[in-house]
Amino acid sequence: MVRNNLHNIWYFFGPFCELVNHARAFGHSVRPVKHNISHHYLEYAAMQISHRLFAVAAVAMAVVAVPLTATSASARSAAEITAQGQQALQSLEAREPRSRLFARHARAVLVFPSIFKAGLVFGGESGNGVLLIDGRPAGFYNLSGGSWGLQIGGEKFSYALFLMNNAALRHLRRSGNFDAGTGPSVAIITTGAGAEANSTTMTKDVYAFPFNEKGLMADLTLQGTKISAIHPR
């Protein structure tokens, strides 16, 4: 599948790359005139074509890569997602003491153990997770979404969403998805969040912890992401 996608991209962009090469060759072969106008103009035109084709090709490659990531994420079994989700939650509680308090008061915890955030040109997030109630699996979900802007490199991280009441849990199950910015109130706990947490300050319906192997992460939100029910075997 990857080979076919790359072949299709080259089939589309190959002729343009050849055109750029011919334009450059022609620019060198033109006899210089006063102030080398012909030579410099053709070189400039070829360079502009190259830059624009590179940008378009980068977008095309990203479009191909993100669906492939989502496909590989959905291939994991229910048992694997559960085991990895439980392990990720244990890792969070070991590294971030505040999460233990949220875990004790939460009605359920939705854990995405491995989310891949794509990089080049635009970002796309994809990963599967497990809904844990009293430590046992009670459903499976996929997180997907995108954040537009210039980004370099990919990144893997985890997300733990503590559903603090039955209303948040019902919303997740009833709607089949969770679009940030609608429904229950959400607070993102990052490295820049306040250090103190207690039962009297837990006023939000959902508390989300983005983290990796180093601990909590900064400047991450759920903006533009959706969480949808899945049914792995």
Image: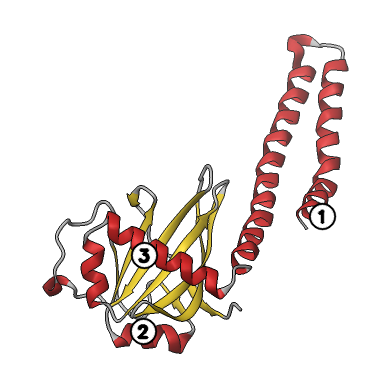
Q: Which of these two is toward me, 198 or 167?
A: 198
Q: Mark 2 or mark 1, which is nearer the start of the sequence?
A: 1
Query: Going by the picture, which residue comes out furthest to the left?
Result: 200
Amino acid type of the residue that numbered disc 3 sits on in the rendered structure: Leu
Residue 169: which disc? 2
Which residue is disc 1 drawn over?
4
CA distance separating discs 3 and 1: 38 Å
Disc count in the image? 3
Q: Is residue 224 visible?
A: no
Q: Mark 3 or mark 2, which is nearer the start of the sequence?
A: 3
Q: Is residue 174 above or below residue 212?
A: below
Kindly state the secondary structure of the residue where label 2 is placed. helix
Amino acid type of the residue that numbered disc 2 sits on in the rendered structure: Leu
Kindly state the secondary structure of the residue where label 1 is placed. helix
Amino acid type of the residue that numbered disc 1 sits on in the rendered structure: Asn
Q: Within the image, what quadrant is residue 89 found in?
A: bottom left
Marks 1 and 2 in Cβ contact (< 8 Å) = no
Marks 3 and 1 in Cβ contact (< 8 Å) = no
Residue 92 in percent (x, y) is at 33, 59
Q: Mark 1 or mark 3, which is nearer the start of the sequence?
A: 1
**Is residue 45 rendered to the left or right of residue 186?**
right
Single out the mark in the foreground, 2 or 3. 3
Residue 222 in percent (x, y) is at 40, 65
Here the colouring is secondary structure
Residue ID at (44%, 77%): 178
CA distance separating discs 1 and 2: 42 Å
Which residue is disc 3 drawn over?
89
Kindly state the secondary structure of the residue where label 3 is placed. helix
Q: Is residue 154 above or below residue 196?
A: above
Residue ID at (65%, 54%): 65
